[in-house]
Image (cartoon, rainbow, N blue to C red):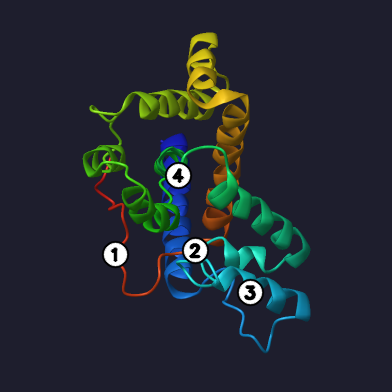
């Protein structure tokens, strides 16, 4: 009985702690948005570059990145390559980002890149099935190559010889390296968003509901 009371007490403490965290998270952001007046010259320069391309303003991963402007600038330059200069076709590149966003259940990542993937030519049924946490059923051959490669990296922490060979045949060696880099980089982006508890812009609907798988 004494042990049972102890277990119940610990359980209730955990519930109360979760409630407190949720309340704090809902009321106060971990990293309050910086005003231009609060920013250093380096932060302002980075903010200027971000606002030229960002669909979430200075929110999402950019809010935490501004706290470390030197690193943030280097990260922004890497993202610039991985978004606009990569050897991976845009449709496949955005697909890879969505696969990462779905695994991390990253509201901001999916909010930002779902429309970009559709605009780049990824079929809506593929986007919808992935959002529902399903393996898309009617992928194009090159999309299946990307899905298998990225999923194996994320879930198995390695890539089989067969999957690697198909990726190399489809994308070339540079494409395999660029695909690996975009996968890892957007895991970092998802981590920044999660650690800072960043949200989609006010008034916008979150892609994932609490009842979603």
Residue under label 2, please give it.
198
Q: Are marks 4 and 1 in contact (CB under 8 Å)?
A: no
Q: Residues within 10 Å of mark 1 (few under 14, many from 20)?
A: few
Dot 4, how many residues are within 10 Å of its Cα: few (below 14), some (14-19), or many (20+)? many
Give the residue pinned by disc 3.
47
* Residue at which label 4 appears: 90
Lower sequence index among marks 4 and 3: 3
Tag 3 near tag 1, CB within 8 Å: no
Mark 4 and mark 1: Cα distance apart in space? 25 Å
Please name which of the two marks, 4 or 2, marks the residue nearer to the observer. Answer: 4
Q: Residues within 10 Å of mark 3 (few under 14, many from 20)?
A: many
Q: Residue at x 42, y 69 (%)?
A: 26
The earlier-in-sequence mark between 3 and 1 is 3
Out of 130 and 156, give the one closest to the viewer.
130
Work out which quarter of the rendered image holds the N terminus and state it: top left
Q: Is 166 rendered above or below residue 114?
A: above
């Amino acid at each position: 009985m004494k042990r049972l009371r102890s277990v119940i007490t610990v359980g209730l403490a955990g519930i109360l702690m979760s409630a407190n965290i949720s309340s704090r998270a809902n009321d106060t952001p971990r990293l309050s948005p910086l005003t231009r007046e609060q920013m250093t010259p380096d932060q302002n320069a980075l903010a200027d570059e971000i606002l030229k391309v960002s669909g979430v303003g200075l929110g999402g991963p950019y809010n935490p990145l501004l706290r470390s402007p030197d690193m943030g600038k280097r990260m922004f330059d890497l993202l610039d390559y991985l978004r606009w200069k990569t050897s991976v076709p845009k449709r496949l590149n955005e697909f890879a980002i969505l696969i990462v966003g779905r695994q991390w259940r990253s509201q901001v990542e999916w909010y930002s890149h779902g429309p970009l993937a559709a605009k780049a030519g990824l079929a809506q049924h593929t986007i919808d099935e992935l959002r529902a946490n399903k393996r898309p059923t009617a992928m194009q051959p090159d999309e299946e190559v990307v899905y298998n490669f990225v999923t194996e990296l994320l879930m198995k922490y390695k890539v089989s010889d067969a999957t690697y060979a198909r990726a190399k045949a489809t994308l070339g060696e540079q494409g395999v390296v660029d695909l690996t880099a975009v996968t890892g980089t957007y895991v970092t982006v998802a981590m920044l968003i999660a650690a800072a508890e960043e949200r989609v812009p006010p008034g916008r609907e979150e892609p994932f509901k609490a009842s979603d798988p």
